[in-house]
Structure formats: structure tokens, C-alpha cells
Image (spheres, rainbow, N blue to C red):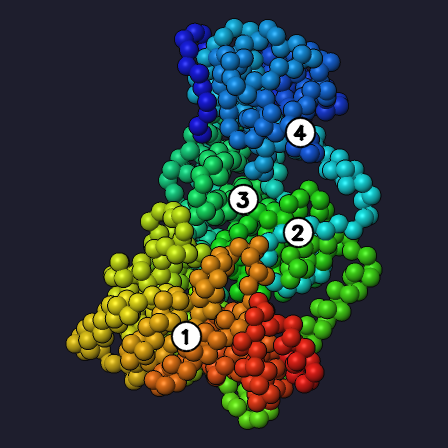
Amino acid sequence: MSHERQSMSGKSISGSFSAGDLRRMLSRLRDVMAGVGAVQGRLDKVVALIAQDLRADVCSCYVMRAGEVLELFATYGLAQKAVHQTRLRVGEGLVGEIAAHSRPLALADAWSHPQFVYRPETGEDFFRSLMGVPMIQAGRVIGVLVVQTREERPFNDWEVETLETVAMVIAELMAATQVIKREELAQQEGNATLLVRLSGEILHAGVGIGCAVMHKPHVRIGRLVADDPVTEQYRLHQALGTLREEVDKLIDTSTGEAEGSYGDILEVYRMFADDRGWINKISEVISSGLTAEAAVQKVHDDTRLRMMQINDPIIRERVQDLDDLANRLLSILAGGGLRVELPDNAILICRSIGPTELLDYDRRKLKGLVMEEGSPTMHAAVVAKALDIPVLAQVQGALSRIDALDQIVLDANAGQVILRPSEEVLEAYHAAVEARVKQKAAYAMFRDLPVVTRDGVKVSLNINAGFLLDMQGLAETNADGIGLYRTEMPFLAMPTLPDVTAQVALYKQVIDGAKGKPVTFRTLDVGGDKIAASTVSGPEDNPAMGWRSIRLTLDRPALLRQQLRAMIKATEGQVLRVMFPMIASIAEFDAAHRIFRLELDRHIRDGGKAPRTVKIGTMLEVPSLLWQLEGLCKRVDFISIGTNDLMQFMFAADRGNTRLANRYDTLSAPVLKMIRDVVRACAGAGVEVSVCGEMAGKPHDALALLAVGCRNLSMSASSIGAVRAIIRSATLRDVESFVLGALNSDDSSLRESFREFTRDRGIAAV
Ligand code: PEP
Ligand code: MG
């Protein structure tokens, strides 16, 4: 870990303090903390002991209190009257600085540091040098441990590391003895029975009602200090063996089943679990006198903080994976048995969670997931989505304000968690959930009814898929096929792209799962908001408009060739539909098409069987294509309008920015006019056209799309029921007269007026 250090000559603070000394000190600290008496008394002894062993004039322990304030909790060397009086905000003074950046400071002359703040009540006038380290517990800074000396003295890396080890041990002991009480936070909230709402970012919409289950409460490390490093090394070795077995088992049980694609994510774990660097570091810390579990925790805390300081979303997401793995290893060392039995309706609360941990829970009992951290592309979110569990991320205060077994409503449609809901609130939500369940059952009953309007216009409904798990949706909805298969989905978790053989196997499973229904495979669409660590070269200022998708695969033709080769092999003798994403010019389509032809020729030359039929198409996501339709239509068999990207480029509005989410409406004249023109151009040229963006899955938008000529829509499986129902309840002639009449409207949205129109005509999604 990097830390600021002033280099000066002089005697080191701890003299010839050795690994053996450290082991002895840790064992004395353990005895003091485990002793009897008030916590304050024990902490007083601890700081005195550290000061004495490290030959410092001062040792102080600051503890993080509610409101991000660091309180001087115990000191040896500073004025006792300052204890519980001196408080520094995070970021204030040197102590606040250490907490803010989770980073040690080692200063020969603390007074000359720009962040230095003088607190007269502490009587620190006489102390020049300072070394402070964060106290970390369960990945959070819970305080700061500081030593000071009268003399100006430098500190070396060994001393900083020693203090870090001591701080880590104290942090764990403090947590075990509950120095930081949750009641304090409860008191701050005032009336504890008051309904509390916490808001967060929606990762997967839906409503879950149930009771809070704290995800694997941080593994409490029973023993911190070990007298026999050899035994600890052996324990580590054994635990790593079990860890590998567990991950292998997860991989085995998740392939072959519907969750096959999780295997890709889990492979990344195997990589971590075999990482020599990580294992060696743990081993080294064991040699300094900690138990295997304390060493795992220490190395994990260090790595975590270092990774969190890197401003790169991919690295930050890997932090969650590392948390997952370290927790797993800790629980093995703690003797396992940490798997929490879920009550029937469980809402899981956590800081963050790894995909393997999520898969460990009984999915039937899991009704929601609330995270203090988390991001849309984290692996657990991908898994939760596939399992259809509502998920909220970035919920500030989730861990401190929610207690185990609290009644909770997770309204991931509105982006909020309601704690301790009143009877009325609960009733309202129960009614909403029940209505949703009934609606789903009704849609399931209507799955075989034809998708046709009252005036006899037939519409093809297809699903968008990306995981093998999504294939179930095809059977459940009886949709006509897969209008968009996002091939990049399983690859997002991989360190490298799978080879051709693995891809062939995956695509074959998709084709087999579709049971003769058409599947449109889209080639890799990575970059932008879909980041694949394997292919992205570095951060970009504007990734959505950057080196992504077809641009990337045309520049790395081997990727595209391998993928196309795999698709051709997987569809021998059957229909092959291939679609290229983010095409912005005819030249790009031609280049991609040429690669496809090369691969097809090669396949046949090598004695392979040709697909029965080949259809090649493109996504329409980039507005420039709108003025190249004539030429494009001469080349393609089909066009699929990707309204998600097309909208973001048309309105210059980042699709991932929630602040802009409601600013522009798809159900508006410019969007519908544009789609009308595309449909006309395609019809004139005899080219199939469909819409596969989110717009197609919203019932009212879907109807409006029919009005401007669309007859083929592709959406997530969960939207099919509602769209089928609204189409069956509408007379297209009427809808056309309303929508076409509104195409010259200057309103930014037609949504309200269209809703009113459908209400008046008795058109409904149920
Ligand atoms: C789209 O852009 O509309 C689309 C369907 O592609 P994706 O959402 O995968 O970018
Ligand atoms: Mg797109």
C-alpha cells in the first residue's frame, strides 16, 4: 500500500523490533482485549502497550462514530481530558486524512504537513513525528491508530506494516467486543419505529416483500494471533484446497443446467483461487505471527483498498469478486457452516455480493437483493437479473440502518427500500405483488393465443436473450423465436474470449433450446456500457461512442472470424441468422459481410456442411444509417432497430444516465416518424424489419410501433405477456388513425394522450 512518508535520517521509532517482537506484542494485545472489565479500560491498556512496545511517546485510538466523525477513544501520551472530546471529521486533520483515503501516513515532521490541525485540548504541542494507519474491519474504516514521538523521526515500511497489523488486530477485537454500537445509529434515527425509506439505483426492477437477512455477516475471526506459523500455513493450504473444490463443484453443478452461462463467471474465480501472488502474500503475513484467517483478512483488506483507489470500473468490479473469494476462504477457515438458512421471504442485505455467493442461496426463497455498493455490470447483478430477483444497488445506509429480520419492502420499480412499513403500506404492496402474480398467471394461460389485433393483423413477437437461462423464456411465452441473441453476455465475465470449440458448444445449446424456432445471433457488442475486460484496451472519454462493438471486432478481425466460424459450425444444415451491431456505414457492413463469406467458404472447403439458409442483417443503432438505407437494403436480408442506442444518439442522451431517463420519450413524433421511414424503406426493398430495443417491450410503445408499420418485435421474455395482451385488445385501424394523426405534434411526448386514447377504446395490457 502506498503511503506518504517523509524521508529523514535518524533512529527508527521501534529500534530493532523484530517479527518475534511483533508476535509477542500481538499475543499480549489479544490477552488484554480478551480480559475482563470495561471496554474503555481494556483499550487504555492496549494503547499503553503499543506505545511501550513501539517505543513511542504517544499512541491514540480514534474510532469512527455516526456521522463520519472520528472520536479520540483512548490515548497514551495525549491529555486524558481530550478522550471522547476531540473529534475530527473524515478528511479533517491528519487523522481525518488517513480515514478519508484509507491510507497510512508516516511523517517525521507532522506539523509541516498541510493537513495538520492543532487541537490544544490534546496537549500535542511536544510531539513532532506521527505515523497513523486506518483501522479496517469488514472492508470499512472503523477508526485510526496513531503513534507519535517527541523527536523528529522517520518511519520505515516495516514499521508502517507493523502498525497496520496491530490496527487490524485491534479492529477485529473491537468489533468482537462491540465497541461500536449499532444502537448509537438507531438513536440518531430518532424514533426507531418510524417508517424509513432508503433509495438506490435499480439494477433489476420488481417488488419483494420479506424480512431482512444480512448476507453472511462478516466472518468473525476467533483467533488472531498464532504461536505456531507452521500449523497456520498448513491450515491455509488445506483451506485453499477446499476452496478450489467448492468452486469446481459450483462450476460442475451450474453447467448442463439452465444456468450454464454462470460457468463463465465462475471460471474467473478459479483463476483468482489459483493466483500465486495472492497466496504468497497471505503466507508471508502468517509468518509474521497472525493466524491463517487473520492473514487472509489482512491481505484482503490491503488488496481491496489498493484496488478501490484505482479509478477503473473494471478493477472495482473485480474487487467484489475478490471479496467473494476471501469471504469463502475465511468461512472455510472458520469451519464452514456460514451458509444462512433463509426464511421463506428473504431480502438479502449486503455491502456487495459475489455471484457464487448469490447462487449459494435457495433461489426460491430469495425475494430481493439490496446492496450498499454494486453496479449494473457486476456479475451478481447479471445473475440476479437472469433469476428475476429485484435488485437495488448503491443504497446508502443499508447495512447500518437495516437490522436482521426487519420487515422490508423492496420496491425496485421505484428504486427504494421501505423499512418497518406500516400495515397500510404492507397491504398496498401485497396487493400489488398479488396482482402481478395473477397477471403473470393470466399471461401464461394466454401463451398459445395468436398475436393478432382485433382487425386481424398478425404480429410476430420474439424474445431477446443473452444467457442460456433466458431460453426458458422462449418456452414459457411461446414467442416466435429469438429476435436478438446478445452473444457478448456470457463473455463479459471472461478474462479471455472462449475458443471456437467452446463457442460452438454454446451456440449449439442455444439452437437446440430454440427447438426449430429462428435465432438471430448478434456478433460481439462489447465496449460502451458493456465492458469486457478481455477486449477493451483502456479507458475512453466517451465509451458509448468509442471503440466498441463492430468497430472493435473489425479492428480485431480474429475475434469476429472465430465467432462467425463458431456460428457457422453450430448451425450446419439449419437456418443461420447473423446480425452485426453498431454499423454506421455501408463500408462497415460490407467489411463484416466479407469476413462472414470468407468463413463460410472456408467451412465448406474444409468439408463442413453449409447452413440450410443464411440471412445476414444489421442493427440500426447509429443515426447515420438512416440516410444510407437505400444502399444498405440492397445488401441485407433484415434490419433490426435497436432503439436503446438509436435513442441515445438521436437525443444525445446517455442511456445509462438516470437523470436523463425521463427527459425524452420514445413514444414521440420524431421517433415514430423515423421508424415509419425505416419501415417504408425496408418494405419497398423487400427487407425484413424488426424492433429489438426496450421500446418494443412497452405495451403502449409496441402498439404505436404497429401503427407506423412494424410487424415484428423482439423484447425481454417478461414483456411478451403484456404486449401480446394489448395487441389482442386493439383494433389497429383505430390506433393508426390516432398515431399517424399525431405524427406532426410538437409535443415532446405522446404518452399521456395515447394512454387516454387506449383507455377510451378499452385497449388494455391485461
Ligand atoms: C439497442 O441498442 O437497442 C439494442 C437492442 O442493443 P443493446 O441494448 O444490447 O445495446
Ligand atoms: Mg445497442
**Label 3 – label 4 distance at C-alpha:** 28 Å
Query: In the image, is the residue at mark 4 within 8 Å of ligand 1 by its beta carbon?
Result: no
Query: In the image, is the residue at mark 1 within 8 Å of ligand 1 by its beta carbon?
Result: yes
- Where's the N terminus, which quadrant? top left
Residue tagged 1: 640
Residue type (three-letter) at the residue carrying disc 1: Ser
Looking at the image, tell me whether mark 3 or mark 2 is earlier in sequence order. 2
Seen at 40% across and 35% down, the residue is 280
Up-down relation of residue 286 to residue 484 (above or below): above
Q: Mark 2: which secondary structure?
A: strand
Residue tagged 2: 199
Residue type (three-letter) at the residue carrying disc 4: Val
Local packing at callout 4 (Cα closer than 10 Å; few below 14, some 14-19, many 20+) is: many
Local packing at callout 2 (Cα closer than 10 Å; few below 14, some 14-19, many 20+) is: many
Looking at the image, tell me whether mark 2 or mark 1 is earlier in sequence order. 2
Residue tagged 4: 69
Q: Would residue 223 be seen by someone viewing this image from the given angle?
A: no
Seen at 48% across and 12% down, the residue is 108
**Label 2 – label 4 distance at C-alpha:** 23 Å
Taking depth in this image into account, of 666 and 747 the one nearest to the observer is 747
**Label 1 – label 4 distance at C-alpha:** 55 Å
Local packing at callout 1 (Cα closer than 10 Å; few below 14, some 14-19, many 20+) is: many
Residue tagged 3: 327
Q: Mark 3: which secondary structure?
A: helix
Q: In which image quadrant can residue 448 be found?
A: bottom right
Q: In which image quadrant can residue 28 be found?
A: top right
